[in-house]
Amino acid sequence: MICDPRFLTSFLSGAYPDNGSATVFLRMFLPPFLRQKHRLVPPSILQCLIVLMLLLVHCASAELSAEESTLSSIQTLIRQSQLGEADKQLQAILQKQPANARALVLLGVVRRQQANWPEAEALFRRAVAAAPRSVEACQSLGDLLRDEARWPEAAAQYQFCHKLVPANYNIASELAIVYAKNREYAKSSTLAGSIPEINRPARLLPVIATNYLALGNTEKAEAAIAEVLRRAPADPDIVPALANSLLDNGMTKDAADLLAIAQVHQKMSPAFLVARAKVQAATGERQPAVQTIEGALKLEPKSQDSLATAAVLAIRWGQWDKALEFLDAALAAGPPRSDLLQSVVFVELRKNDLQAAHDVAQRWYTLRPTETAAALAFAIVLVEGNHWGEARPLLEKVLAASPSDKRAQLTMGVVQYNAGDLAAAKKSLNASLGGDVDDASAHYFLGLISKQDGDAPEAIRQMQQAVSIRPENPKAYGELGQLYLQQNNLDQARAALEKAILQAPDEPQNHYQLARVYNKLSMKSEADEQMKLYQKLRPQRPQAPQEPATPPQPTPQ
């Protein structure tokens, strides 16, 4: 009653309403100078202002309390999965208060549970903009970026949250975990070490062990691994998490040993079976790996991690259609993780479905233009389609944000090579080298540059490097064959070209070059056969004098 604008207007005019409850309130609430015995007196202007301030404070507090109660009730509806009713009430609040950060966060939670990830992100970003110091809004956005495996963005967001509340050990732990995912092990180790042991969640223990291993502190790493094993019976997911980290760092035997020790003391969770399947696949045990991942999916058919691993195994064995099935199921089972989207693009490229790869990459980049992984995947697809000009600004954007991104440097080198800027291409390609499987592509293009520069020995050396890293490499073998032929090294030219044809029998140019080799070796019938194959294949795929270089394809992480 007293917060009704009509009541306040009546009071200020001196025309008090004839209402018992309001009169009682005024007698209790108003200062003595507005009460004389049992009678209210008309106020002066100054007195009106004082009373108005008191009433406004009271009314604002009552309104805030009512709003908090409403939002708490909505939160209960969300916990009870009554998302439709929660949505309706939140929309009503936001229609009146578009910048209500708490309502925006809750609606973002609703959208997450409805698997509408882009809208959830937009709502969390609106909440952060409306209330920059809201820890709830900040962490909600960070958690979404983490769950989508957008590690650089997640790290930046959690850093901001950590600055807001340095003593919040949950946020500090998430930031340390994300740092490790970004391979920023020193930062991760320092932050994890600053968290008191009693406040460290179990999920942080595998990260601590990984940090020590990456930083070469063997003694502390062994102690951290022992702590993981000690805590494993109470938290069965921490051993698989550590095994996955070991695998990511090329420590396959250590991962296998860890799982062998731990399996005696803990239950076989889907996460444990997933890690075991990865180890088996990495050590060449294909059938056991298939059986293990099937066991994980039997325990939890909609586990995103299990489905994603099944896709990775299918990719490893070149089962492209099966990989896409698992990837589609994984994306339907949880957030649109960057590694899954990247794998979809990779598989579509391997299937030679450039349009499908383009559609996925373009949609990914359109939805998340600030994500470097999306920009890079789109650039690679554009390069695959020989759209060098469109790819360049995307790559420049990626390299501006991540100057040492080796895949971006490699792809930029390909763009520069096809643009004829050989000096810049050579610089970018050399910068991209770093012990990864993509080094095969870098050596291939460096070999092409040396070939154009007339340095045949260096071109041969680069091509040999390419095939040693990636033996299934018909383009490099084809180039090697041509280079050996130019040097009249016929036996090596023959061996290289025969390998190239074995791996890519539909490539006409290799048949033509092998026919030349056979002619020089006086193998006329074999030469004739190769020329017939060349003539048969040539109309299906006309050869330009200088075919544009094929760009690297994104490999799944």
Image: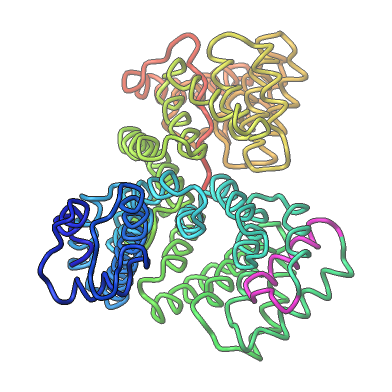
Q: Is residue 246 left or right of residue 269?
A: right
Q: Position of residue 551 (x, y in %)?
A: 51, 27
Name the chief secondary structure element in magenta: helix
Against 438, residue 283 (above or below) is below
Magenta part of the chain = 197-216
Magenta region includes residue 201: yes
From this view, report whether residue 452 is shown above or below residue 79. above
| Residue 102 position in % (x across, y down) | 37, 59
Decide which of 238, 144 is in the foreground and name it: 144
Quarter of the image containing the N terminus?
A: bottom left
Which residue is depicted at the point 40% across and 24% down?
385
Residue at coordinates 33% horizontally, 66% vertically from top-left? 30
Q: Taking the image as drawn, is residue 333 in sight?
A: no
| Residue projecting furthest to the left | 18
- 415 is within the stretch colored magenta: no
- What is the total number of numbered labels drawn onto the structure image? 0
Image quarter for residue 223?
Answer: bottom right
Q: Position of residue 274 (x, y in %)?
A: 52, 71
Residue 164 horizontal side relative to residue 427, left or right = left
Residue at 15%, 62% (x, y): give it: 16
Q: Is residue 151 above or below residue 39?
A: above
On the image, the x and y values in percent for residue 204 come to 66, 69
**Which residue is most to the bottom?**
265
In this orientation, which residue lies closer to the viewer: 354 or 51? 51
Residue at (41%, 54%) from the top-left corner? Answer: 319
Q: Nearer the viewer, residue 541 or 525?
A: 541
Q: Is residue 360 left or right of residue 276?
A: left
Which quadrant of the figure has residue 180? bottom right
